[in-house]
Image: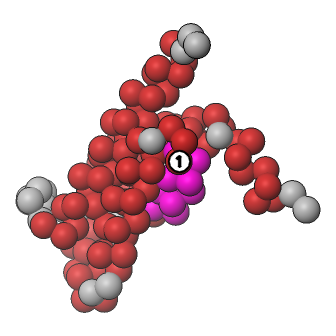
């Protein structure tokens, strides 16, 4: 069975996308990536609030790790995209309202996620049909 170039590109992008989210999720538990020193005041307050809540960062971290692994595996990619989607919305909103420096990478990641969801649209039809 031949695999098209489009399928190969989607696999590579999904693999890298999944690894990025696995890395982000693991960082929420092990804090191995340093925080940028020049974060805006709004962002510092938001991060402080998340730390104060206590349970939200581990929840997001677990969702990022699970979603990242599921996106890497072609058979479970549609489910992984559904798990990552609300996190991606949060990433967009954070970059729009708090600090726009990460917006270019957020747009690229969002485009990859949309492509993954479009390619798996048939798997979502039972969720919305009667």
Q: Which residue is mark 1?
A: 76
Q: How is the image coloured?
A: secondary structure
Which is nearer the eye, 1 or 11? 1
Residue 41 shows in this picture: no
Residue 126 drawn at (x, y percent)? 79, 55
Residue 120's place in the image compared with 11, above or below, is below
Q: Residue furthest right?
A: 130
Residue beneath the point at 37% across and 36% down: 15
Residue 28's place in the image compared with 69, above or below, is below
- Disc 1 is placed on an element classified as helix
Main SS of the magenta part reads helix
* Magenta stretch bounds: 77-88
Residue beneath the point at 19% across and 70% down: 29
Q: On the rendered image, what quadrant is the C terminus found in?
A: bottom right
Residue count near mark 1 (Cα–Cα under 10 Å), binned few <14, some 14–19, many ≥20: some
Q: Tag count in the figure?
A: 1
């Amino acid at each position: 069975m031949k695999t098209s170039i489009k399928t190969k590109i989607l696999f590579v992008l999904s693999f890298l996308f999944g690894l990025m989210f696995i890395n982000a999720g693991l960082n929420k538990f092990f804090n191995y990536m340093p925080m940028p020193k020049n974060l805006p005041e709004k962002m510092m307050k938001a991060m402080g609030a998340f730390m104060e809540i206590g349970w939200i960062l581990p929840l997001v971290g677990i969702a990022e790790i699970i979603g990242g692994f599921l996106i890497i595996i072609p058979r479970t990619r549609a489910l992984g995209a559904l798990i990552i989607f609300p996190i991606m919305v949060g990433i967009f909103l954070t970059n729009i309202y708090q600090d726009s420096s990460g917006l270019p990478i957020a747009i690229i990641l969002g485009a990859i996620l949309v492509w993954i969801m479009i390619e798996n649209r048939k798997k979502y039809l039972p969720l919305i049909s009667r």
